[in-house]
């Protein structure tokens, strides 16, 4: 075969090149080589071409086993730390392209340009079928309008260990009457507990605000019976008009009594004791009350009610005498006509009441004694006092001193050797 002769090789046609057709080069003494060209005249090298449009060469297994692998690559190291395993795990989590919305559906992959042009639905209307629980999943911006199919109760089912959460601010609750029927046995049935706030005093509320029921520390509910929110007006209860039969009998045994004590005036009921006059005192007699005092009371206003008074042992105090603490007495001597103090001045608002006076003249000169309201004051009473004699007066009506907080004085009409005067009485208003 000529040195540059070409032989057309057709796939599957069994074209051969005889070995004796390969001659030795007369210059280099090398055998002539066979060059494989493509139809375009490009030489094909033996082995796997790395460049574009290269053709693979298939080596038999006997040849492969004789190949020597390349030496270690400088700067190369095996991966450690499990990053490749993590990468595989995370890659396995990537879902298939597209979203299958129904069985046997084919997912569609949309480009980013197409996704941004889509408009999401603003609301979804779901109609519940009878006997089926309704489960709704919402994102943070979606709203779902749920329409119940029938008049049956809409029940919410908690799956697994989930928690059913209710809205904290409930505006209205419609309770089904079938929870507990009328006249039903309630033993063991759990009901709704109403919330109440316990305070020691009634709380203050703000208009148009919601608050808990108000309870005291004993758990009792505070209820207002006034007709105004501020509890300023009394709660008036007006009974229905009922005509009672006339002359109804009353069982006195209900009040442990036997007879009705009348006051003598129609419509007036009297109070009587449990024993009559001159009968031994019973267990609980009606006592007449009086005030025990040791000093004079302040005078009351005219026409006003005044109470009885006694001394400290219960003896009734009556005129002309006062309680012992208010008794007064005095004695003095004079030898001329000078005004002399006889009874001292009582406290403010009080005056002296004279009930008895005694005078005695030891001289030979006749005279009389003048009782005065204060020193040299108004002459209240004259008592004769003859020479070597005297007089004693008991006044059935006490001699009332006109001026309060003032002493009683006396004076002899004429000078005498010695005149002795004594008086007694009480102080009062």
Image (cartoon, rainbow, N blue to C red):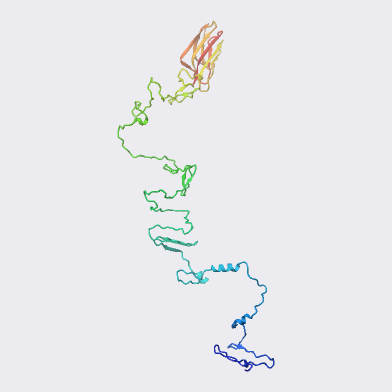
> Which residue is depicted at the point 48% across and 11% down?
393
* Residue 326, above or below 157: above
> Which residue is depicted at the point 55% across and 11% down?
333
Residue farthest along the bottom direction in this orientation = 2
Q: Position of residue 99 (x, y in %)?
A: 49, 69
| Quarter of the figure with residue 286 | top left
Q: Position of residue 34 (x, y in %)?
A: 62, 89
Pick the front one: 22 or 251 = 22
Tell whether 193 sits left or right of 1.
left
* Residue 248, above or below 379: below
Pick the front one: 76 or 370 = 76
Tell whether 304 sits left or right of 36.
left
* Residue 113, above or below 29: above
Quadrant in which the N terminus appears: bottom right
Q: Position of residue 56 (x, y in %)?
A: 59, 82
Q: Position of residue 31 (x, y in %)?
A: 66, 90
């Amino acid at each position: 075969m000529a040195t540059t002769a070409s032989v057309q090789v057709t796939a599957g046609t069994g074209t051969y090149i005889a070995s004796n057709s390969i001659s030795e080069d007369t210059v280099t003494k090398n055998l002539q080589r066979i060059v494989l060209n493509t139809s375009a005249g490009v030489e094909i090298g033996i082995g796997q071409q790395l460049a574009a449009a290269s053709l693979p060469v298939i080596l038999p297994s006997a040849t492969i086993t004789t190949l020597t692998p390349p030496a270690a690559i400088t700067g190369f190291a095996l991966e450690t730390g499990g990053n490749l395993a993590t990468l595989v795990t995370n890659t396995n989590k990537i879902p298939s392209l597209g979203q299958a919305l129904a069985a046997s559906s084919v997912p569609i992959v949309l480009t980013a340009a197409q996704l941004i042009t889509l408009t999401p639905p603003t609301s979804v209307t779901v109609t519940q079928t009878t006997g089926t629980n309704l489960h709704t999943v919402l994102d943070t911006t979606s709203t779902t309008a749920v329409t119940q199919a029938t008049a049956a109760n809409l029940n919410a089912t908690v799956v697994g260990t989930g928690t059913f959460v209710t809205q904290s601010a409930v505006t209205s609750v419609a309770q089904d009457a079938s929870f507990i029927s009328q006249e039903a046995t309630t033993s063991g049935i759990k009901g709704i507990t109403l919330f109440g706030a316990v305070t020691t005093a009634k709380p203050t509320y703000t208009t148009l605000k919601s608050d808990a029921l108000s309870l005291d520390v004993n758990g009792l509910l505070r209820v207002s019976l006034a007709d105004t929110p501020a509890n300023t007006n009394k709660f008036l209860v007006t009974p229905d008009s009922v005509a009672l039969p006339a002359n109804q009998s009353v069982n006195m045994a209900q009040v442990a009594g036997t007879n009705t004590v009348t006051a003598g005036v129609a419509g007036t009921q009297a109070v009587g004791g449990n024993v009559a006059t001159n009968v031994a005192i019973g267990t609980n007699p009606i006592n007449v009350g009086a005030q025990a005092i040791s000093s004079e009371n302040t005078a009351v206003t005219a026409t006003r009610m005044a109470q009885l008074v006694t001394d400290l042992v219960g003896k009734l105090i009556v005129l002309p005498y006062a309680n012992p603490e208010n008794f007064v007495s005095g004695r003095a001597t004079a030898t001329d006509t000078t005004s002399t103090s006889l009874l001292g001045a009582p406290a403010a608002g009080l005056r002296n009441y004279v009930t008895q006076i005694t005078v005695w003249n030891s001289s030979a000169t006749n005279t009389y004694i003048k009782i005065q309201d204060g020193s040299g004051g108004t002459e209240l009473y004259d008592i004769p006092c003859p020479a070597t004699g005297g007089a004693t007066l008991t006044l059935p009506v006490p001699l009332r001193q006109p001026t309060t907080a003032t002493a009683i004085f006396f004076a002899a009409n004429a000078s005498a050797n010695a005149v002795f005067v004594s008086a007694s009485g009480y102080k009062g208003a």
